[in-house]
Image (cartoon, rainbow, N blue to C red):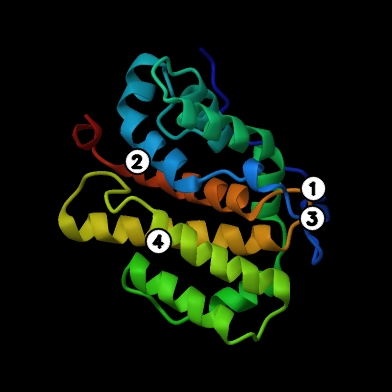
C-alpha cells in the first residue's frame, strides 16, 4: 500500500479563516481523545502490518487507521467524522490566525495538561475576547481534560510528561484556530494539530517503545 508522505498545501489557505464560523451539529463533532488514543495504541500495527511510513502525514495516518479490521463502532464513527472534515481542518491549521495566536500567547506557561486546561478556562472567564474565541477557550479546556493520561509514546517518566503536555498544547492551539474558522469544527482542527504532534513523538521514539 502506498501512502502519502506529504500533504498538499493550498496557497490561499487564509481563505479558510473567518471570524464568524458556522457551528456544525453536535453529532458531527469528533472526539479527539478517542482518535488520539487509537492512533497511539495501533501505531506498531500500522507500521508493521499496513506499511505506514516512518513519519506519515495526518492524511496517511487516518487512511491507515480506517483500514484496521478490529475497531469498535464508536472508533469507526469517530474516524469517519474526522476524515470528512480533515481537508478543511488541515487548511485551518496552517492559515493565519492572528486573533487566536494573540489569545494563546496571553496564556501563562503550564507545567501539565491540567494546568493548561485551568489557564484556558480562566482566559475564557475574563471575557477579553469575542464570543467565538471565548467558546473556543472553553472547548479547548474540556478537550484537554478528556485526553488519556497515558497519551504519547511510552518513554522515561519525564519525557512522557513532556509529550503529554506538548500533545495538549497542540490540541488547544488547533481548537482556538478552529473556533474562528468557517465550515469546520474546532474539534476537527484541534485533533488534526494534536495528530501532527503525536506523529512527531511516535516517529522520534525508539522502535522498542512502540512494540
Mark 3 and mark 2 lie on one chain; the one further toward the N terminus is 3
Residue at 46%, 31% in the rendered image: 75
**Residue visible at 63% across and 69% down in the picture:** 135
- Tell me, for residue 132, which label it has, or none: none
Which-is-in-front pick, marks 1 and 4? 4
What is the CA distance from the residue labelled 4 to the residue labelled 3?
Answer: 25 Å
Residue beneath disc 1: 11
Q: Nearer the viewer, residue 19 or 27?
A: 27
Q: CA distance from mark 2 to mark 4?
A: 21 Å
Q: Position of residue 89 (x, y in %)?
A: 66, 46
Q: Secondary structure at mark 3?
A: loop
Q: Name above or below for residue 25 compared with residue 146.
A: above
Mark 3 highlights which residue? 22
Determine whether label 4 and label 3 are within 8 Å by CB.
no
Residue at (35, 38) in percent of width and height: 40
For marks 2 and 1, the one nearer the N-term is 1
Amino acid at each position: 500500500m502506498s501512502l502519502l508522505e506529504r500533504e498538499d498545501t493550498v496557497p490561499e489557505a487564509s481563505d479558510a479563516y473567518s471570524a464568524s464560523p458556522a457551528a456544525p451539529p453536535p453529532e458531527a463533532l469528533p472526539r479527539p481523545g478517542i482518535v488520539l488514543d487509537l492512533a497511539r495504541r495501533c501505531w506498531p500495527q500500522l507500521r508493521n502490518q499496513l506499511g505506514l511510513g516512518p513519519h506519515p502525514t495526518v492524511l496517511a495516518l487516518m487512511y491507515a487507521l480506517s483500514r484496521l479490521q478490529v475497531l469498535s463502532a464508536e472508533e469507526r464513527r469517530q474516524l469517519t467524522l474526522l476524515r470528512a472534515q480533515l481537508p478543511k481542518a488541515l487548511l485551518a491549521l496552517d492559515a493565519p490566525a492572528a486573533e487566536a495566536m494573540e489569545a494563546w500567547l496571553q496564556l501563562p506557561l503550564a507545567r501539565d495538561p491540567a494546568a493548561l486546561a485551568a489557564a484556558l478556562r480562566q482566559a475564557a472567564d475574563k471575557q477579553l475576547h469575542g464570543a467565538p474565541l471565548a467558546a473556543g477557550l472553553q472547548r479547548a479546556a474540556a478537550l484537554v481534560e478528556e485526553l488519556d493520561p497515558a497519551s504519547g509514546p511510552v518513554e522515561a517518566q519525564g519525557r512522557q510528561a513532556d509529550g503529554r503536555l506538548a500533545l495538549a498544547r497542540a490540541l488547544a492551539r488547533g481548537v482556538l484556530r478552529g473556533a474562528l474558522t468557517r465550515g469546520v469544527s474546532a474539534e476537527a482542527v484541534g485533533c488534526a494539530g494534536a495528530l501532527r504532534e503525536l506523529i512527531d513523538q511516535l516517529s522520534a521514539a525508539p522502535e522498542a517503545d512502540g512494540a
